Amino acid sequence: MKCPYCNHSRSYVVDTRKCASHVRRRRECQRCKRRFTTYERAALIYPTIVKQDSRQEPFDRDKLVRGIRKACAGRPIASDEIEEMADWVIERIQDMQTPEIASHTIGELVLHKLQDTDPVAYLLFASVYLPLPDLYSVKIEIERLQTRHKQPEKETIW
């Protein structure tokens, strides 16, 4: 591992911590004695994503995380929880053991996880992913969520 400060090729590991989806290592350069952190993640072979218009593109974990993060913007959801959701979706994709996967299948997995995590984030993601052409469709989806979560409806002030 090359030092990011002096480009020396030798460093030693000071500390190792295992996280849910990666290994975090604190390293110290043998030449300049500065410390830096590396993250290790297993290099998995992902299936090709087939879009609705039949285009194909390689799976991109960062794109998945960005989509989940966008839906969770402004919600009380920690970054670690978003990473865990992405890891859960990737595990389901890997379990399918298929060389190609439809993009809508990934969207359904994300919706499933968001529905259990945060109903508002679910609605934000669903408003882009699901066919919700009008306010009535959104209202029906909200009512379905309320029934699922069994939360009492709050009075509206307007």
Image (cartoon, helix red, strand yellow):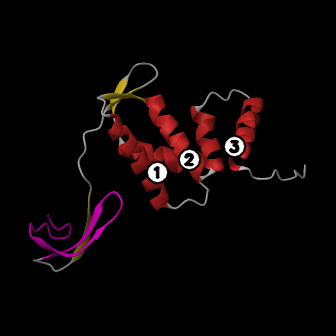
Name above or below for residue 157 compared with residue 46. Answer: below
Q: How far apart are marks 1 and 2 (CA)?
A: 8 Å
Range shown magenta? 1-29
Label 3 neighbour load within 10 Å: few <14, some 14-19, many 20+: some
In the shown orientation, is residue 49 left or right of residue 9? Answer: right
Are the residues at dot 2 and dot 3 in contact (C-beta closer than 8 Å)?
no
Q: What residue type is labelled 3?
A: Leu
Left or right: residue 137 compared with residue 62: right
Residue 60 point in image, percent of width and height: 35, 40
Could you tell me which residue is drawn at 61 percent across and 56 percent down?
A: 74
Closer to the chain start, of discs 1 and 3, is: 1
* Label disc, if present, on residue 26 of the rendered structure: none
**Picture residue at 60% right of the left edge, 31% below the top:** 130
- Which of the two labelled residues, at mark 2 and mark 3, occupies the earlier sequence position? 2
Magenta highlight on residue 11? yes
The residue under label 1 is 85
Mark found first going from the N terminus, 1 or 2: 1
Residue 136: x and y, percent? 77, 30
What label does residue 145 carry, if any?
3
Can you say whether 70 is above or below 20 in the image?
A: above
Q: Are marks 1 and 2 in contact (CB under 8 Å)?
A: yes
Asked if 44 appears above or below 84 in the picture, the reply is above
Q: Mark 2 points at which residue?
A: 114
